Image (spheres, rainbow, N blue to C red):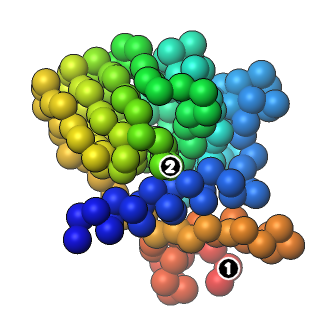
């Protein structure tokens, strides 16, 4: 049941937008996207980590360069960008060039929750999760698109990884709710559990 799956994705995405563990938002360093880039550059976030970044849809065009850098220079850090669409019916990414077949694009997920408007992008990268939206693509995309309607005018180069996560709405629990799919508690793990 595709509609049931889209409903479930929208529900999960909307819950993720309210996750208490978000550390990157507009109050951090003036720009959530710039703050996330700095955390990757200075080693506060390393390969295998997951960052949750909250931005408003109106900021996407303003920070095209930061988005392009996150797509290309994320160093294996998974970046979930929760796009707040309050007050907008159309989201425009502007021109974000992520090149062709960039494997790093699989690490950036744009979460639109239950947004039901239009998303426009001439070229981009990442995984777009917008189960109720209409996605309008004018150029190649490195990643994937999940949307109610996709108007495709170029290629989507499917570059995806495996992700498992749960929503942590328990404010007292220090766990961020994001689980590494490789966390099998075996000798190859880098963690302590």
Residue drawn at 83 percent across, 68 percent down: 171
Q: Is residue 76 visible?
A: no
The image quarter in which residue 173 lies: bottom right
Residue drawn at 50 percent across, 32 percent down: 70
Q: Decide: few, some or many residues near mark 1? Use Cα within 10 Å; few <14, some 14-19, many ≥20.
A: few
Specify which label sits upstream in the sequence, 2 or 1.
2
Number of residue marks: 2
Q: Residue 148: horizontal and vertical position, in percent?
A: 28, 47
Q: Decide: few, some or many residues near mark 2? Use Cα within 10 Å; few <14, some 14-19, many ≥20.
A: many
Position of 155 with respect to 20 (left or right) is left
- Nearer to me, 15 or 140: 15
Residue drawn at 49 percent across, 83 percent down: 184
Q: Residue 17: horizontal and vertical position, in percent?
A: 62, 50
Residue drawn at 30 percent across, 36 percent down: 134
- Nearer to me, 7 or 15: 7
Q: Which residue is labeled 1 in the image?
A: 192
- Which quadrant of the figure contains the C terminus? bottom right
Position of 70 with respect to 152 (left or right) is right
- Nearer to me, 71 or 23: 23
Position of 20 with respect to 15 (left or right) is right
Q: Residue 132: horizontal and vertical position, in percent?
A: 37, 47
Q: Which residue is labeled 2 in the image?
A: 113
Establish if 64 lies above or below 24.
above
Establish if 142 lies above or below 60.
below
Q: Secondary structure at mark 2?
A: loop
């Amino acid at each position: 049941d595709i509609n049931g799956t889209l409903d479930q994705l929208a529900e999960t995405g909307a819950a993720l937008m309210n996750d208490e563990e978000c550390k990157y938002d507009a109050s951090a360093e003036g720009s959530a996207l710039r703050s996330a880039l700095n955390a990757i550059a200075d080693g506060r976030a390393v390969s295998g980590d997951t960052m949750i970044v909250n931005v408003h849809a109106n900021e996407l065009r303003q920070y095209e360069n930061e988005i392009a850098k996150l797509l290309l220079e994320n160093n294996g850090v998974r970046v979930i960008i929760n796009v707040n669409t309050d007050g907008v019916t159309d989201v425009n990414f502007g021109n974000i060039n992520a090149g062709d077949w960039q494997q790093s694009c699989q690490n950036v997920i744009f979460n639109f929750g239950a947004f039901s408007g239009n998303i426009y992008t001439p070229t981009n990268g990442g995984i777009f999760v917008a189960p109720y939206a209409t996605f309008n693509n004018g150029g190649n995309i490195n990643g994937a698109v999940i949307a109610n309607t996709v108007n495709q005018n170029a290629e989507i180069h499917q570059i995806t990884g495996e992700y498992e996560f749960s929503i942590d709405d328990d404010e007292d629990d220090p766990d961020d709710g994001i689980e590494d799919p490789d966390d099998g508690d075996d000798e190859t793990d880098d963690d302590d559990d």
